Image (cartoon, rainbow, N blue to C red):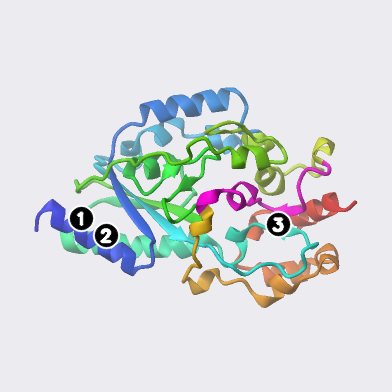
Amino acid sequence: MNIRQQTYLIKQEAYRLGFSYIGIAKAERLNEESHRLDEWLSKGMHGKMSYMANHFEMRADPALLVPGARSVISLMYNYYTEKKQRDASAPKISMYAYGKDYHKVVKKKLKLLLKFIQHIIGEVNGRAFVDSAPVLEKAWAAKSGVGWMGKNTNIIRPQGGSYFFLAELILDSELDYDGPIKDYCGSCTACIDACPTDAIVMPYIVDGSKCISYFTIELKDEVLPQEMKGKLENWAFGCDICQQVCPWNRFSHPHREPEFEPSDQLLNMTRREWQEITEDVFEKLFRYSPLKRAKFKGLKRNIEFLKN
């Protein structure tokens, strides 16, 4: 079986496992991207996310994660749903957190794909990554052509939008490589104009320390900055504004992953129920949810901050 045939079978298996899109790039050091990351860090745009500065060389060079790395497979997994929180005045939860923690759901499928690759190719060393390791996933996604990096720095898929989780397999085996696609943002500035905290400081650069998701998830301070009062647009965990206004997301279609289905209890919670949520309810309702990242204390802090 030649490389082209192997690559075809790998892509077909990825689709069978539920991935929406797959692209493959040659594993090499990301010189331009690492330079931009260095500038971003030097300007303090990572805020208190100190982990962003860790393992810098690993982020730049996939061979430091997988010795002899030759291929980076980028995959997109749809999480879009048309279901909404029913109380429009309730604290808002980012759509990606409606269901079970995507790290575990997607990683399980990645490991199955890796086993399949090892089955058809033979001895292949590789590692699976889902947003929890020093991998510049957006850079690899753009290089592989699964989408382009939008002005809000999300990966956008033509006729598909941006409501996708990204995942990667780094392998020490050569495959048939794809190339990047055109940037279709054009002159649109919808995401930049809509951001209430001006986090998108210029096209393709997001100041992470100004992002609502940073304040509601990453920042662990006991009290949120007073200058953000009235600017969080009622978001208690994450933020979807720059995706909601993106014209390309009119092409979004509902996912088919049962693990990402939101519970009726979450969707039906009223503003008052969110404000009065107890730790017991939190632990039961969000036992397998990404909201565990904020913890009960962090979620309560956010909800209190949103009160008038």
Q: Position of residue 288 (x, y in %)?
A: 60, 67
- For this rendering, which residue is in front, 98 or 183? 183
> Within the magenta stretch, is there residue 50?
no
User: Which circle's residue, 2 or 3, is located before the other in the chain?
Assistant: 2
Q: Residues within 10 Å of mark 3 (few under 14, many from 20)?
A: some
Q: Amino acid at mark 1?
A: Thr
Helix or strand or loop: what does disc 1 sit on?
A: helix
Q: Residue furthest left?
A: 1
Q: Is residue 275 left or right of residue 295?
A: right
Q: Is residue 114 visible?
A: yes
- Report which residue position mark 3 lands on: 295
Q: Is residue 246 part of the magenta span, yes or no?
A: yes
Task: Determine contact: label 2, label 3, CB under 8 Å.
Answer: no
The spot of residue 95 in percent (x, y) is 61, 60
In the image, residue 270 sits, relative to residue 67, either above or below, namely below
Q: Say which residue label 1 marks.
A: 7
Q: Amino acid at mark 2?
A: Lys
